[in-house]
Amino acid sequence: MLALSLGASGVAAVISFTGVLTSAKPISGQTAVIVGSRAPGRPWLDLAWQLFAVVTALVPVALVGHFLVRGQESFRSIGFDLRDRVRDLGRGTAIAAVIGGAGLLFYLGAHATGTNLTVDPSQLPDYWWRIPILVLVSAQNAILEEVIVLGYLNHRLDQLGWSVRQATATSALLRGSYHLYQGLGGFAGNVIMGVIFTYLYRRWGRIMPLVVAHTLIDTGALIGATYLLGKVSWLPG
C-alpha cells in the first residue's frame, strides 16, 4: 500500500531534497511548488489533468477500503464516516485554527533560518476553476494522508502488536518524509503534526476530525497564498 502511495512519495521527497542540498543555490533561495499548471495556456486541458490527478491520487484510499472489507472491517473501523459529522466538523475546525496558525509561524521561522525552501502553494492561472480545484486538491490530500498514514497504518500496526509509541513514531516520521521536498522545516513541522494527529485519533477513535482539519489547513494555505504571495512583505515569495 505504501509503495503505491505515500511511501513512494517519501522516497521521491528524499531524492528531491538531495537535489536541493547539492544545488549551488541556498535552500531558501529555491522554490517548492505544490499545485502548478499541467497544461499552460490550455485551460480545458489543464482542468482535465487537474481532475485526473485528484481522482487517481485517491485510488489507494479505495484499496484501503477493499483491504478493510476483506478483513471483515470497514472505514468505520478507523472512524472515516459521517456518523458524528457535527462534532467532527467542530473539532476539525478548532484543530485547523490552532495547527494552521502554528504551522505558518513554524514555516516563516524555518525559512528565515535558511532550512526551508520558499513554498509556492499554487501557481494555477486565473481561470474560473482555480479555486474549486484548490479546494478539491486540499480535500484529496487530507483524505489520502489521514486514511492511509493516520488511520490505516496505526490500525494495522496495532493489530501487529506494535506499541503506541512505535506506531506513533512510524506514522509521524512517514508524514514528515513526504514533506521533505519543502525542506527541513517542512519535515519537522509535519512530524510534530503527525504526533499530535495520532494522539487525537487514538483519543477519539476517529480520523474524520483530522480529515476536516487537514482540508481546512490546506485550503487556507493554497487559497491564501494565491491572493497574498507577492503582495505582503512578511510572506516569502
Image (cartoon, rainbow, N blue to C red):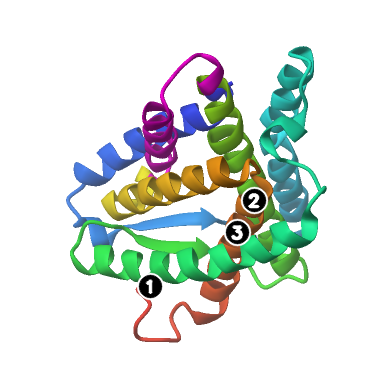
Q: Looking at the image, which residue is at 26% across and 68% down?
A: 109
Q: Quick check: 165 above or below 44?
A: above
Is the residue under label 1 in contact with that under label 2 (CB below 8 Å)? no
Q: Quick check: 169 above or below 86?
A: above
Return the mark for residue 237. Answer: 1
Instruction: Inspect the image, locate mark 2, and give the three-letter code of the amino acid beneath it.
Output: Val
Element carrying mark 1: loop
Which is in the foreground here, disc 2 or disc 1?
A: 2
Element carrying mark 2: helix
- What residue did someone put label 3 on? 213
Q: Position of residue 112 (x, y in %)?
A: 22, 69
Which residues, given as a range, are shown in magenta? 158-179
- Place residue 103 in its image quadrant: bottom left
Is the residue under label 2 in contact with that under label 3 (CB below 8 Å)? yes
Q: Looking at the image, which residue is at 70% across and 57% down?
A: 88
Please tell me how crowded label 2 is: few (under 14), some (14-19), or many (20+) other residues with Cα within 10 Å. many
Left or right relative to 47: residue 159? left
Q: Between 202 and 69, which is closer to the camera in this rendering?
A: 202
Q: Quick check: 10 above or below 24?
A: above
Magenta stretch contains residue 174:
yes
- What residue did someone put label 2 on? 211
Going from the N terminus, do you reach mark 1 or mark 3 first? 3
Q: Between 89 and 54, which is closer to the camera in this rendering?
A: 89
Q: Position of residue 54 (x, y in %)?
A: 70, 45
Magenta stretch contains residue 216:
no
Q: Position of residue 150 (x, y in %)?
A: 55, 37
Going from the N terminus, do you reach mark 2 or mark 1 first? 2
Between marks 2 and 1, how big is the CA–CA gap?
28 Å
